[in-house]
Image (cartoon, rainbow, N blue to C red):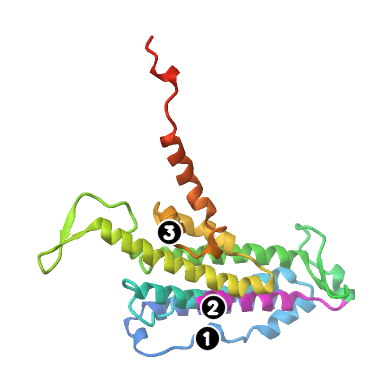
Amino acid sequence: SKRLAENLRRKNEALKASAKRERADPLSNLAPLVSPVCLNDDAVALHLLVKLGRYQEAATAYAARRSLLLSECLHERPISSPVGMDAVIYAAQISSSFFSSLAIAVEGFLDLFIDSNSENSGNDDDTSLNSRSLTLGSGEKRIPPGALSAIVLWCDSELAKFTNVFGSSRLLGSLALSPPGIRRQENKDGGKISLAKEREHSIEVAAKCVSQAFAFASENLDSIGLPLTPKLAENMRPKLKGCEAEVAALLDMRWKALSFEWTMERNVSSRLSMTPRSSTDDRRV
């Protein structure tokens, strides 16, 4: 079992290094490429590790390979230049690819660790976690507790990677979401473009991009019983550079519950500013 786990680890590390080299190659964008991380060539070794009761090693190897696959989804070439309203198309592209792949990976993860053989129920090598396990169906299928904990932690880490890419200069980071300054810029025609107008347009684009992420996350993950959209909203908020209240106002009604906290602080501060000062504050001693 140790040799199987080591071989999987070395192969995943080699695929990771190869993917980095391919992304760094300036000629890699000239032709379509199918990454070898998309191949399910580790299935036999993973099932052997599970049969041997080495659930933790199997979980680690499975997550490492699927993390590479999700990384490929986040580094897909945009089908259109992510500038202006075309950024919404790019947001839909990476959201659809990422969350559909994440849902497939989660289902495969659970299928891998469903143990229908009751004799192996005592072979769970992960004794540091909760000893209780999840049973499916009539109780004949069991998911080890280590696998359940691993999938939650893995999903959280992959969701953080998604929001980092989503908020980078490739998407939200390229939008003028910061508060406008007093300066004005001249365009090539000699006219003047207000930074406030540019920010207003950027907020509109950001709201459409966030809506795409929420929609694909809900569509793919809620259907498999893994509602990660609230966690996505929590991670997305810092990427909006303080304009989350304006973005929340433009979101569809079905996402109002997710963005409630985005507007709560703004409402509290506005109420405090509108509260009249008490008479005791005006007294002079």
Quarter of the image that includes the N terminus: bottom right
| SS under mark 3 | helix
| SS under mark 2 | helix
Q: CA distance from mark 2 to mark 3?
A: 31 Å
The residue identified by callout 2 is 69
Q: CA distance from mark 1 to mark 2?
A: 9 Å
Q: Is residue 52 visible?
A: yes
Q: What amino acid does circle 3 point to?
A: Val
What residue appears at the point 44 percent right and 53 percent down from the top-left corner?
245
Residue 141 badge: none
Dot 1 crowding, Cα within 10 Å, few <14, some 14–19, many 20+ = few
Q: Nearer the viewer, mark 1 or mark 2?
A: 2
As for residue 264 lying within the magenta part, the answer is no
Q: Nearer the viewer, mark 2 or mark 3?
A: 3
Q: Position of residue 127 (x, y in %)?
A: 78, 60
The residue identified by callout 3 is 247
The residue identified by callout 1 is 36
Asked if residue 106 is positioned above or below residue 268 in the image, the reply reads below
| Magenta span | 96-117
As for residue 109 lying within the magenta part, the answer is yes
The residue lying toward the viewer, choosing from 257 and 65, is: 257
Q: Nearer the viewer, mark 3 or mark 1?
A: 3
Q: Position of residue 186 (x, y in %)?
A: 14, 62
Q: What amino acid does circle 2 point to?
A: Leu
Q: Position of residue 106 (x, y in %)?
A: 65, 74
The residue lying toward the viewer, choosing from 163 and 25, is: 163
